[in-house]
Amino acid sequence: MMTKVGHLPEETSSFVGRRAELARLHTALTTRRMTTLIGPGGVGKTRLALRAARAVADRYADGAWWADLSPLSDDRLLLPTVSDAVGLADHTLRMPVEALCEWLGDKHLLLVLDSAEHLRGPCSHLLAEILTTSIGLTVLVTSRQPLGTRGEHVVEVPPLPVDGAPDALQLFADRLRAADPRAGLDAPGDEVAAAEICRRLEGIPLAIELAAAGIGRHSVAQLATRIGTRFDARSGTLALAPGGSRLDILADETAWPRRHRTLRTAIGWSHELCTPLERLLWARLTPLRTDFDAEVAREVCAGGPLTPDEVDRALQGLVAQSVVQRDGDRYRMLDTLREYGRMWLAELGEARAAADRHAGSFLGLARRAHEGWTGPDQVSWYHKVSDTHLDLCAALEHLLAHDVEGAQEMAGRVGFFWACCGHLSEARNYAQRALDAGPVEGPHRTRLHWVLGVAALLQSDFATAEKYGALCTATALYDRDDEGMLGATYLSGLTQLMTGQPAAALEAAGRVLRMTEGVPVDSGHRLRCRLVIVFALTALGRLAESEAAATALRQACERGGEFWTRSYADYQLALIALLQGRPEASATHARAMLAGKHRLRDSFGIALGLDLLAAAIAAQGAGAQAARVYGTGHAYWRMVGHPQRGTPELGPVRERCELQARAAVGDEAYQRAFERGQSDNAEVGLAAALRTELQL
């Protein structure tokens, strides 16, 4: 069971044995640029890779980073997944592979790609690209087969030894105690029976863990006897136990290497230990790509004999059987067990119905997130949309094939979240595909145009943003959609601000706000339209009016628990204070902006805020500190693939304050501090920037 800590997952269960493998892997990682761990499912490749990566992470200046590829059904999301894993949220129009190669070009890091077997060709092609352009990159892959990439060094992961070594038995005992601290191998004959179980299961860690989980319903001796009926000791081949499951009959043993068949039998035995409703839940959970909570399990799996209450009971049963792993209120299923459940789902004839429920659940999440954008749970919704990205994509793919109207609604509702999270390519791709899939009218059409425009704007594609701003305006007027009009005005106004037309943005935003006074004051589009007013007044030099408008907007956001717009109101208050010669107040507002953007994981907003904070610090005479913050800001700008950006009036402010910082400490000291900020871990650099003490 793993949860994310830093750039690598956290180990939350004991690690047993593998000294020889770890030594070989340590040598490979320090002498080879690409190593692939191969072996059958359940043999422990992921755990071994994680332990090895942790052991060498401090050798890499830019750390060790982990990408789990098991949830990907095809290669369409391979590049975005790897980019996310290494901290890149590209905001440009470049080819994604070009952006990734540039981002990794000067990095010294370890990249781990876990569970790559179903994407061998695409992974091999991608790794050939990035290893060629990124000389400081080392790659560790886990796969059931080699990828075939040039220069690949293959290390086979064997099962745990079962003859003459205690590792497999230790794993069995550890997992017994993890389920029940009072459990052990203390009864007469238990240790011998446990050793026989490990031998029968050929030392395959997942099979041993599943067997240990079955102790709750059997004694160790009973378990050994039951597992023994699965094997013909004379021939060394598998035998179907009386009453064996249909999936064992379906499995073609000639197509499976012996260890694969051993694991398949162990999983099948674990399946038989489950109650009928637990088996049904196991199958129905398989469409989920990411970690989930009990509410999602109920939405995706309830139906027929599986009532919502039965889902809860069956879920706890699967946890007890180690089929599902739990971390707090989150659950996940290993890919090997998901494969088995998927076979069972197809055998039951429920694959389409399960996909329909999955898509319906995540369409519902998109609706609720959209409605909750300006409420007190905005940050929570923002994170839910970010964390369930792969499930949302899978749901959209299904809806595009089977429910076009649902896909059009979903792409429009989730698109702004994706744009804010940095998934600009996916936002544009799905919005365009939804538009192309069939006729669409009303608010769904306006939202899709709006998503395309906002994504284009954030990619500096101003001509496309202007085009979709006009389309949004036209369709909203035709539909008499006040919310759509406000959204269109925000998009067009921001485009005008970025292209140096603040007067036009101010006039249009003011007019539309007056036209739509019936829209609630806490509407997301209304708040964003007011933000355009603030930006435009600042750009026109009407600072007193802008400050009053920004203060009122911030208060409105604070009352409703809205962070995204509030952060940009703080940003404007920081800029206004700096332009008015009040650098201390500017720094306070800039830090408030950064705290909000950090909560939202908004790298683009953080980059903007760091530039402004650096300017405010420089204006107070702390040149070295300002240079370090500028350096951290530069690192964030690289994360989004842009040089420094912002509305046009910010450029001269940056230049003036950089000159002040250089003058305060000298060019050499300035450059040292800048490079320190640039090379810092981003979180470390941001934490340093948020400290309020001034270093003169």
Image (cartoon, rainbow, N blue to C red):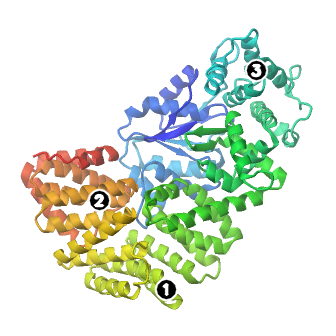
Q: CA distance from mark 1 to mark 3?
A: 68 Å
Question: What is the x, y in percent for residue 158?
Answer: 65, 26
Residue marked by disc 2: 593
Which of these two is toward me, 123 or 173? 173
How far apart in space, not on screen, are marks 2 and 3 (Cα)?
Answer: 58 Å
Q: Is residue 63 left or right of residue 265?
A: left
Image: 81 above or below 216: below
Binning the other alpha carbons within 10 Å of mark 1 as few (below 14), some (14 to 19) or many (20 upward) gives many
> Do the numbered discs 1 and 3 sit on residues whose CB atoms are within 8 Å?
no
Rendering coords of residue 205 (x, y %): 66, 28
Disc 1 to disc 2, how far (Cα)? Answer: 32 Å
- Side of 657 where 381 appears, left or right: right
> Closer to the observer: label 1 or label 3?
1
Measured as percent of width and height from the top left, residue 661 is found at: 12, 54
**Neighbours of disc 3 within 10 Å: few (<14), some (14-19), many (20+):** many
Residue tagged by mark 1? 476
Q: Which amino acid is tagged 3? A: Ile
Kindly check if marks 2 and 3 are in contact, taking CB atoms under 8 A apart as contact.
no
User: Label 3's element?
Assistant: helix
Q: Earlier in the sequence, mark 1 or mark 2?
A: 1
